Amino acid sequence: MFATSTQRSFWMFKDETDVSNARLSANIKYITRRGKNMTAEQRELHFLNVAEEKSLIMSYEYQLRDFCRKFHPPMPRYVVGTALHYLKRFYVNNSVMDYPPKEILVTCVYLACKVEEFNVSMDQFVGNLKGDREKAATIILNNELLLMQQLDYQLTVHNPFRPLEGLMIDMKTRFPTFSDPERLRPGIDEFLEQVFYTDAILMYSPSQIALAAIIHSASTSKENVDEYITQILFSDDQKRLLNLIEAVKKIRVMVRNVQTPHRDSIKAFEKKLLLCCNPDNNSESPAFKKRMKQSFEDEENFEDGQYPSRPDQVRNVLMGLSEMGKI
């Protein structure tokens, strides 16, 4: 249940300011670490600011959606929802400059498939990717443990789709004066797709988001569900009703204000990202390739009976085994 979930306990923020502060903290932490020998002016020119990072993250959320739409076999929307949750959670506490978003994106989808028991093999999964599929599989396996660590191994996600179905059944049962609630589906589905590109999923419960979708669809269709909300759902709890009304208003405003990042701006941010990203975590960089080579060498020594002694050697062996799918 959501009420007792890790999502509610650890991944719900107070408001948009709270979310923005977490992203700002991650941005400042990275710039302070990587730009310690730069002047303030040099840092401003070299690194992405938090607003630029947010735009980039949104563009990758759209890329994640497009990848999942084209995925074969067809991917259930709750898997897509879980993957988007993972991506948002990861980058609310990490900078896109620190970890390559393209690699984290596909790892989020792969992990969501496993957690939501949408059973696809690694070969099937990378078959949906362009380019070197063997390399893609290695990158995903390399990042999977990192992703789980950054999510604090709290992998269960409560999406708004299940509470939505419960509300639709309830409307059909207890609100018979409203004929055929299914006609609200198109507006509901459109709203739920847009809500994942906002921070509402980090601030509001799945049931609040589901109800906001129903109210939004009814409103845009010139229908009225006020009686269902006030006289059936919350007839005995005016305080909860007032809290819900406020939450629904804010969610709808957030969805209404969703703006697709401008393509030219994203291209400029991508170029800037190439210059300021962390080479230790970039699979194309010499530093990363050197580290990977060392991990494989350590693994071979381990299998030959030459046991590592230093902590960094032990870590390399474990990373190598993870990448090869042996742990």
Image (cartoon, grey):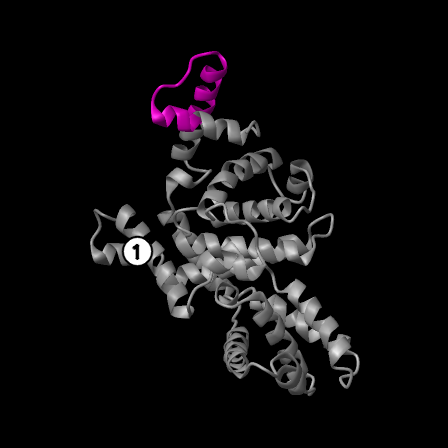
Q: Nearer the viewer, residue 44 or 2?
A: 2
**Percent x, y for residue 159?**
60, 61
Disc 1 crowd rating (10 Å Cα; few below 14, some 14-19, many 20+) is some
Q: Is residue 297 magenta?
A: yes
Instruction: Left or right? Give the position of 29 relative to 200.
Output: left
**Percent x, y for residue 8?**
50, 60
Above or below 169: residue 239: below
Q: Tell me which amino acid carries mark 1.
A: Ile
Q: Which quarter of the rendering shows the N terminus?
A: bottom right
Residue at the image point whose x is 28% and y is 58% from the top: 44
Residue at the image point whose x is 74% and y is 81% from the top: 175
Most distant residue in the top direction:
305
For mark 1, what is the residue? Answer: 28
Rendering quarter of residue 231: bottom right
Residue at the image point whose x is 62% and y is 70% from the top: 210
Q: Which residues are magenta?
A: 293-316
